[in-house]
Image: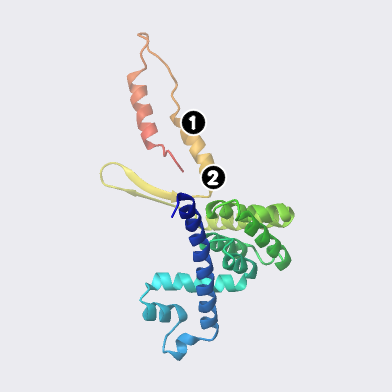
Amino acid sequence: MEDSELGETAVLMTRLQAQVAELDRRVLAEADRRDVAAKSGGTSTANWLAHTTKLTRTEAHRRVKQAKSLDARDQTRVALASGDLHLEQADVITHAINALPADKCPPETAAVVEKTLIEYGTDFDAKTLKVLGWRVWEILDPEAAEAFEAEQLAKEEDAARNNTKLTMHDDGTGAVRGKFVIPAVQGAMLRKLLLAFAAPKHQATKTGQPDTAESEELDQKRAATPKRM
């Protein structure tokens, strides 16, 4: 092959791999729908696939999960079948659509998000598509996205308050050890207070050197101050 032919073939192989992957997942989805595994004595499609093909159970479960996701997202499946997306991109898109809250994002809006992400697949890799997934919905329906984020934040704050705890114990060496869990807002406040408490006063003695006792005290405070909360 000439260099140009070799490059074209490499790109073509990527498209062919995407098409084969779509066909494989479509067959698995149909096998799962017909419960082929049960007819062969298997406990599940994934376990049956792992046993019959000698794939690891992890890989078999991953493929069946992909098959079910693509089966529910026809636009993405068709784009994969045509080679316009590769499997990694298709995975990200189906995950992004499935992550949209059904009570805030109706099916017609989800379909537009899916279509937009498929179009972005021409220019962006899977990592970027993952970031764009939520962003597209925010642009299409900012009020719904904002309301959902507010609900999620409230749930996180409630969970943080419910999990708040403080434990302390004497370690027998003249020191007390402990750990705590507090909400992020209170954590930021505590961190600010500790940093202010440990801040240097920059007081010098008559010789122009920092006071030794104060310097040692400050080092101890800094050592006890967590760098990250």
- Residue 186: give its label: 2
Tell me: residue 8, above or below residue 94.
above
- Residue 74: give its label: none
Residue 28 at x, y = what percent? 50, 78
User: Which residue is pictured at 48% across the width and 53% down the height?
Assistant: 7
Residue 146 at x, y = what percent? 69, 53
Under circle 1, the secondary element is helix
Quarter assignment of residue 151: bottom right
User: Which residue is pictured at 37% across the width and 12% down the height?
Assistant: 205
Q: From the viewer's perspective, is 36 left or right of 152?
A: left
Q: Locate the N terminus by quadrant.
A: bottom left
Q: Is residue 39 visible?
A: yes
Under circle 2, the secondary element is helix
Q: From the viewer's perspective, is 204 left or right of 189?
A: left
Q: Nearer the viewer, residue 196 or 77?
A: 77
Residue bearing mark 1: 196
Q: Residue furthest left?
A: 173
User: Which residue is pictured at 46% across the width and 31% down the height?
Assistant: 197
Tell me: residue 76, above or below residue 64.
above
